[in-house]
Amino acid sequence: MSEINQGHAAKISWIVEYAVWYEEYSVKAWFQDGSVKIVDPKSVVFKEGVGAMFKPLQDIKYFAQASYDQESETICLLNRADTAPEYRYGNSDNCHVLTGK
């Protein structure tokens, strides 16, 4: 990340610093503001009429391969299905705050 972007990114709390598969259909994520959250995207993955991109994630063995992508600073799923990081951070229906501000 360039020095210019680093200054800007420091003000964005939803930047993911690290993430690991947690349990079932959830990921434990450490955010730039120091908070640690359990991101639970079940409402998206199992939504009626879900698109082809999210369908494979209904297989727990596939979903459990979620990881952290350092270059893009976000949670990475094998099929590249994704939700916006600011959505994961702030959506109270899908994130349960463990610690943080």
Image: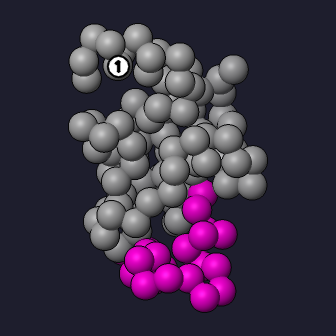
Image coordinates for residue 41, horizontal then vertical, percent: 58, 62
Residue 96, relative to residue 66: is it above or below?
above
Q: Residue at x 65, y 23 (%)?
A: 100
Viewer can see residue 59 = no
Q: Residue at x 69, y 20 (%)?
A: 101
Residue at image mark 1 = 5
Amino acid type, mark 1: Asn
**Magenta residues?**
40-61
Q: Residue at x 42, y 53 (%)?
A: 21
Residue most toward the bottom?
A: 49
Image coordinates for residue 81, horizontal then vertical, percent: 40, 66
Q: Is residue 38 left or right of residue 65?
A: right
In terms of image quadrants, where is residue 17? top left
Image coordinates for residue 68, horizontal then vertical, percent: 33, 45
Viewer can see residue 92 = yes
In terms of image quadrants, where is residue 45? bottom right
